[in-house]
Amino acid sequence: MIPLPFAKDRSYAVLGLARSGLSAARALTDSGATVLAWDDKQASREQAKAAGVTLRALDGIAWEGIEGLVLSPGIPHSFPEPHPVCAAAQAAGVALISDIELLAQASPQARFVGITGTNGKSTTTALIGHLLAQANAEVAVGGNLGRAVLTLPTLGEGGIYVLELSSYQLELIHSLTCNVALLLNITADHLDRHGGFEGYIAAKKRIFHNQGAEHTAIVGVDEEPGRQIADALEQDSPARVLRLSVERRLPGGLYLHECWLVDDSAGKAERLIEIASLPRLPGRHNAQNIAAAYAACRALGIEREALLAALASFPGLAHRQELVAEQHGIRFVNDSKATNGEAAAKALSSYDAIYWIAGGRAKEGGISGLEPHFPRIRHAFLIGEAQQDFARVLAGKVMADCCGEMATAVRSAAKAARKDGVKGAVVLLSPACASFDQYPDFEARGEAFRAAVAALREEQAA
């Protein structure tokens, strides 16, 4: 646990005892604070109690003398309506904070890289962590991705915390200053929690708060909100502003041109690397992730050649277009994180001969809007609750089989790919659905895909 010396002999309330809240309660307790901790779910309370956290219901407590309410990011404090404990704390003038705010207060000696955006946060965060580690920087990666931040190692002076930050987390941050702040993209999401699109944009913009002239703001400008934010930062912020695009040339920024990443930040339009040479980072969306990670690390002083070499060794991120195997010229790609049509579109746009495994518990819109990608799909293999509905959408456009469950879909897709013998064939799990009809989460679904591929390979090797 990261020590929080400023919390000694102070009192804090903690609401929500999942990953981040539990670590905050433990770190505060270990640092000598008085902690009032609660979760509305009995299972979470039992887990916290087993971890040595003292529980106390927070409804009706006296807020006088409470330094702050440490709030888990999943708990609403404004829209669609505040949790009653949040409303009471705010009425008493008690600040709502997060575990990331506690980390920022505890680590003035460290540097911070913050990454946000509607899509691509996790890959970019993991990629930056990889590039910095390969350059022998002292680095720790966490936040919305991976480990809760207060369980990360304490870094020395100049150490770098690389943090994925969601809109929920950004609303609860006050003192964090990102040496490098990245906003990848913004499309409508979580609108109920932010009172509409403008509230969501306002939450994302908080990543740039507190930046000074020695800091860097990196902004994806392929959507209008990003362009507006970049314009506003150039006018109002002392930070250096660097723009990214994968759709057009961008004088003074980083952009994708003829499948090459180009750096024009110094006005030289230097070709850096051909995106096709990085098979674990396929597609235009990953080109943006690559550009953002490269720009962030250059802003931290890492040399160009070291970064380009390290890009090639990035193993990819689990369940996000993860190449799990290649056999008989067929690639097996796990994109279980694609839980809606928009996310699946990014994967479908990345390959040309797709044997597509899709389905699960459909979200609003299903796979409508994916029609432009249908010509890339050689055959679809459908699973879960949505399989019949998806089959009707695909009828007359894409050959489709209802397979029911993962192992059958993997086996059928591999058999069809071998029979067709198409160069560049990809068996792609990109479900465009939630997993909860058959699996507890998208990770479990991805592991089922991985296991089915491994079993298939063992059979063929026998």
Image (cartoon, rainbow, N blue to C red):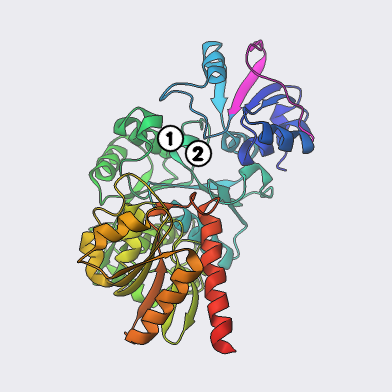
**Camera-side residue: 37 or 333?**
333
Which amino acid, mark 2? Thr
Residue 227, given in percent of the width and then of the height, sits at 25, 45
The residue identified by callout 1 is 209
The answer to whether residue 36 is above or below residue 357 is: above
Query: CA separation, marks 2 and 1?
Result: 7 Å
Q: Residue at x 41, y 42 (%)?
A: 213
**Camera-side residue: 156 or 97?**
97
Residue 184 in view here:
yes
Packing grade of label 2 (10 A; few <14, some 14-19, many >=20) is many
Q: In this view, does 375 lie to the left or right of 305?
A: left
Which quarter of the image is occupied by the C terminus? bottom right
Which quarter of the image is occupied by the N terminus? top right
**Magenta-colored span:** 51-70
**Camera-side residue: 381 or 185?**
381
Please tell me whether the stretch drawn in magenta is mainly helix, strand or loop: loop
Q: What element carries label 2?
A: loop
The residue identified by callout 2 is 177
Q: What element carries label 1?
A: loop
Q: Which residue is drawn at 54% across and 17% down?
A: 84
Q: In this view, does 48 lie to the left or right of 308?
A: right
Residue 197, given in percent of the width and then of the height, sits at 30, 34
Whether tag 2 and tag 1 are in contact, CB under 8 A, the answer is yes
Per the image, is 451 magenta?
no
Per the image, is 66 magenta?
yes
Q: Residue at x 32, y 39 (%)?
A: 233
- The outermost residue toward the bottom is 462
Which amino acid, mark 1? His
The answer to whether residue 419 is above or below residue 159 is: below
Residue 316, given in percent of the width and then of the height, sits at 49, 66
Q: Is residue 344 left or right of residue 231?
A: right
